[in-house]
Amino acid sequence: MRAWDDLPLFPKLLPSWVPGVVAGFASLHLIQKLLFPYFWADLRYLLKVLLYGLRVESYRQRGKIVTVLDKFVKLAEKQPHKAFLIYDGKVLSYRDVDRRSNRVAQVFLHHGTLKKGDTVALLMGNEPDFIHVWFGLAKLGCVVAFLNFNVRSRSLLHCLTSCEPKILIVGADLLGTLEEILPNLQKDISVWVMTKDSTFPSVHSLLDKMEAASEDPVPVSRRSASNLKSSVLYIFTSGTTGLPKAAVISHMQVLKGAAGLWAFGATAEDIIYITLPLYHSAASLLGIGGCIELGATCVLRKKFSASQFWSDCKKYNVTVIQYIGELCRYLCSQPVKDGEKNHKVRLAVGNGVRNDVWREFLNRFGAVKICEFYGATEGNICFMNHTGKIGSVGRTNFFYKLFFPFDLIKYDFQKDEPIRNKHGWCEKVKKGEAGLLISQVNAKNPFFGYAGNKRHTEKKLLSEVFKKGDLYFNTGDLMVQDHENFLYFWDRIGDTFRWKGENVATTEVSDVIVMLDFIQEANVYGVSVPDHEGKAGMASLILKQNRAMDLEQMYKQVVTYLPGYACPLFLRVQT
């Protein structure tokens, strides 16, 4: 007789209704997998976003505003010896960065006339002192304006005029740029350079004063924020029209940006590799801010190098990288080497990678999760591709739209404006059709606009869209939503195109070209180039009567007054 023959049969122990319930749950699970395959992934992501928002809101309701800078200072106390920043082989701990930023704050507390809320413009490349100066000024309650160091001459002066800084701080490697604009700089702007002495008249040196300054913290009251909606940064963007505009960045937006890496699954144990320029929100808010949100370590590089990228990743045990589409293509264009998958990178966070490059990147460099996202610097809407669907910038669903309302509307390309029906309302596109992305502006999802020009702020808003009194932010981007609710970037509207990861304003380029005495008219636009992201600049030119084209003078004009990415690559000349 077998030992288990006397045991009661398992089915006899169960009530008669249990098998039916089990079968019902199995059927529901099967239906969910077939009809709603992304339900649980969507739910996990949405809960993560909402929990972060509730945490911030709970602080606010208790009368305690906690900023990203506050979190950094707390980490410097909690984990003082942990590496915060690695640059060119040198390791700076959380305490090191905190103390050096204190020196910056002390210099301007005792040598300057800065008040809480004053603006300071920062013209520096990627280096640790960018972060030290940024944090030091923030500790004084200043609004810091990040200037694009590629922008030259007239455009750079325009940036300074629009943000109205009391002080301009210039990196040691950008003194040539300073020399160009110094004669035309407003006299009430105090200029400081990141050197131990200054050869420019009336220009102050900063490094020598930092070395002599105290490491003691300045009063917390200088940096304390009374409102998460108060301004903390200006980040310049070309948007969809004209010269660069200073997007107003609030404490709330910095907190949201800093949560991005965490939302994609990064942890305090990760090491983040930043090669993108710090003057962009991707590197400063998502990268540096994200590192602080996690309490992690970041490796900062002066500029991106395709040949050194993976060597750095292996050398510093990098686990999270940031990218733009061009960066991934450059890496895929490098000669194939042995052991390309022998690294620890598990997440790649960024935007703009093409489908073919996405696939090639995964095939060549291994099981790296590509975390594509969409978001404008000044915008109030963000999408995150948390499922890894190739080509998509993110997903949406009923619940996401409930908290972050947006729509895709029909657009008239001839009139360059949204289509309105006979009743004056905008119309939504169907799934699978390209439409203009607009996001509702409300108390939970505000739009903070641009500094120095109310007209630019108003131009980005659409009112009376679907009903009387509503207000939407116009992203200027065309998107497509498919039948699975994945979203795809389609194109940009307006007088800009994107090249080398930067927005190029066609009016800015044409204005520079028509300054030449042999040019009658210049029409600048973007053209697609095979195997390249974005569009390259094409200038269609009409020469003045009886004048000849002077290519040497043309070249000198554009490289003098325009950043490299804005210089036209192609010319069409009509006589």
Image (cartoon, helix red, strand yellow):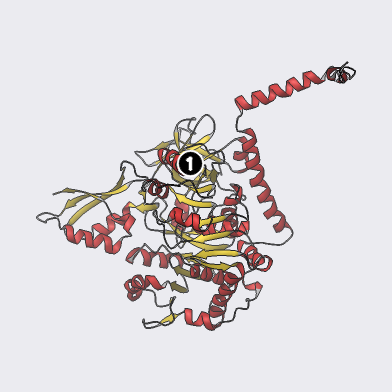
**Is 395 rendered above or below residue 213?**
above
The residue identified by callout 1 is: 437
Closest to the observer, 542 or 347: 347
The percent coordinates of residue 180 (x first, y second) are 32, 72
The percent coordinates of residue 138 (x first, y second) are 57, 69
Give the image quarter of residue 26: top right
Residues packed near mark 1 inside 10 Å, few (<14), some (14 to 19) or many (20 plus) = many
Closest to the observer, 271 or 117: 271
The percent coordinates of residue 373 (x first, y second) are 51, 45
- Could you tell whether 565 is left or right of 20 in the image? left
- Could you tell whether 367 is left or right of 78 in the image? left
Q: Quadrant of the N terminus?
A: top right
Give the image quarter of residue 257: bottom right
Counting the numbered discs, the total is: 1
Residue in view at x 37 percent, y 83 percent: 201
**Is 240 rendered above or below residue 132?**
above
Q: Is residue 349 visible?
A: yes
**What amino acid type should be assigned to the residue bearing mark 1?**
Leu
Closest to the observer, 308 or 237: 308
The percent coordinates of residue 17 (x first, y second) are 83, 18
Helix, strand or loop at label 1? It is strand
**Is 190 rendered above or below residue 486?**
below
Residue furthest out toward the front? 1
Residue in view at x 37 percent, y 58 percent: 243
Residue furthest out toward the left? 546
Residue in view at x 19 percent, y 56 percent: 519
Residue in view at x 39 percent, y 54 percent: 307
